[in-house]
Image (cartoon, rainbow, N blue to C red):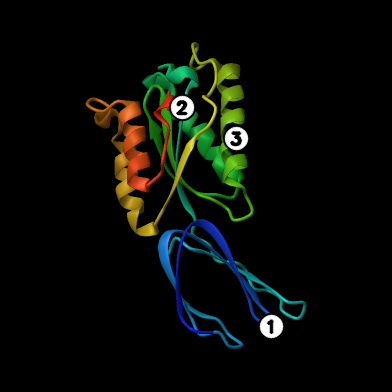
Amino acid sequence: FSCTNYYSLGIFFFLYTHDTSILFRNFFCQTTLCAFSDTVKFTLPNDVTILKGLNKKEKGIMPYTQILYHIVFSTKKRERTLKFENQEELFKYIWGTIKNKKSHLYRINGFEDHLHILSSLHPTICLSNFIKDIKVSSSIWIKKNNIFPFFESWQEGYAAFTCSYEDKENLIKYIMSQKEHHRNVSFREELINLYKDAGIEYNEKYLF
């Protein structure tokens, strides 16, 4: 099996040998696979998910993963209902939700009309379900505790960007500085810049 370079964006590659299957989930990175024999040798960046399928004779091998997502979503109609004085309580609640999903929250912050979440994602969890559960449970919790009296709901949809482990610290700093960042940049401008940086085509008609 000759060495081959694969460039992919959120695409699954299935590669089979006579007794082993490897699933590579590679976002925004280059992966080099090197000669297959009875063992697998590879050189991979840290943001690649590797799931090794076992044949019936193999036992006790666990998958090793590193999947980081920068997730952004807003309040309904982008209304500024998330008042700063109660945001920490909301962040703690969402942290608990993410922890229950066997994922790790690296940073959560936002402004009065949207949130930023940097989190790992457990390989058994679908991204859309992950975000849906965060939205649904936090919306119920907000209304039950009345910490944001004018909060109606979260806006439908979300933005999610994969990121490499090497970029984690820079993203944490970016998310931490949201209040300062939005003194000069609107949420609309921020979202458009994130789309452009990720190479995502968008229709401004559906941004707001």
Q: Which mark is residue 18?
A: 1
The earlier-in-sequence mark between 3 and 1 is: 1
- State the residue position of label 3: 132
Residue at left 54%, top 50%?
A: 121
Q: Residues within 10 Å of mark 3 (few under 14, many from 20)?
A: some
Dot 2: what SS?
helix
Image spot of residue 8 (x, y percent): 47, 60
Q: Is residue 65 visible?
A: yes
Q: Quadrant of residue 44?
A: bottom left
Q: Is residue 173 above or below residue 22?
A: above
Tag nearer the camera, 3 or 1 = 1
Q: Nearer the viewer, residue 54 or 90?
A: 54
- State the residue position of label 2: 206
Name the residue at the right extreme: 56
Q: Quadrant of residue 64?
A: bottom right
Dot 3: what SS?
helix
Going by the numbered disc 3, the residue's amino acid type is Lys
Q: Are marks 2 and 1 in contact (CB under 8 Å)?
A: no
Image spot of residue 110 (x, y percent): 38, 30
Q: Residues within 10 Å of mark 2 (few under 14, many from 20)?
A: few
Q: Nearer the viewer, residue 95 or 114?
A: 114
